Image: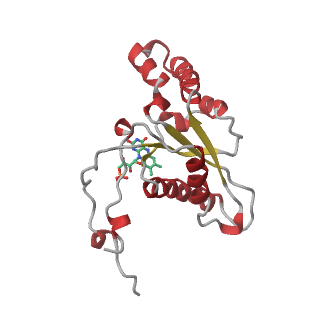
Amino acid sequence: MPLSFLLKRRSVVVARLQEPGPDKDEIVELIAGAIRVPDHKALAPWRFLVFSGAARADFGKKIAAIYEHNVGEARTDRAYENELNRFLRAPVVIGVISSPVDSIKVPQSEQLLSAGAACMNILHGARALGYAAQWVTEWIAYDAKVDEVLHLEPHQSVAGFIYLGSSSEIPGERPRVKPQDVMSYWSL
Ligand SMILES: Cc1cc2nc3c(=O)[nH]c(=O)nc-3n(C[C@H](O)[C@H](O)[C@H](O)COP(=O)(O)O)c2cc1C
């Protein structure tokens, strides 16, 4: 089936990702694939932050502190521990940052879509290299203090965190709507 690459596409949830993850050369290859997205006026409105090795635990310490500050007395040891380990759930995490450029011709929404397409290309690229991946946001994508830790500039935002690793399991099917239910032919 010519389209089976898409028709069988599935994410593998973060909890099922294991070592090994992509190595340094493969990460560059994945990002080379990610930036071949449609990009109106070639503005390159995305950046990629790679977390691997010890950086994952270092980031965890920072976000655990932000979690603690955000929730105050609602803090629990378990949730704190989860934050410490958030990026240790996968061998590699790539933060895809929407980084729109001021442009009269290209609306910001188009530039954000291009960053989303970059996320999708990383998912496809990971699969092509034999890895499993999931595109996740969670609260850390939408917290101003986390943005600071990520060194984001005010116009930048997180489009997604792509968790990458290996998985021996083939995920089961996920219910999908029928194409016919979400399509129609336009006519007058
Ligand atoms: C922008 C965006 C953010 C997402 N954030 C999360 C998330 O925080 N947690 C989660 O479990 N899934 C999240 N997902 C969904 C997963 O990426 C994925 O689609 C889901 O696990 C179902 O797998 P599938 O891709 O095989 O349908 C997000 C998807 C998108 C497009």
Residue 113 image position (x, y, % from top left): 56, 59
Residue 5 image position (x, y, % from top left): 37, 65
Q: Quadrant of the N terminus?
A: bottom left
Q: Which residue corresponds to the image point at 33% horizontal and 65% vertical from the top-left?
A: 7
Residue 169 image position (x, y, % from top left): 28, 45
Which quadrant of the figure has residue 141? Answer: top right
Q: Which residue corresponds to the image point at 46% horizontal and 43% vertical from the top-left?
A: 164
Q: Tell me which colouring the rendered structure shows.
A: secondary structure
Compared with 24, 9 (above or below) is: below
Q: Quadrant of the C terminus?
A: bottom left
Q: Nearer the viewer, residue 44 or 142?
A: 44
Q: Which residue corresponds to the image point at 34% horizontal and 77% vertical from the top-left?
A: 184
Q: Nearer the viewer, residue 76 or 86?
A: 86
Going by the image, does 98 lie left or right of 119?
A: right
Compared with 123, 23 (above or below) is: above
Going by the image, does 164 lie left or right of 66?
A: left
Which quadrant of the figure has residue 77? Answer: top left
Compared with 25, 106 (above or below) is: below
Q: Which residue corresponds to the image point at 54% horizontal and 43% vertical from the top-left?
A: 23
Residue 137 image position (x, y, % from top left): 48, 41
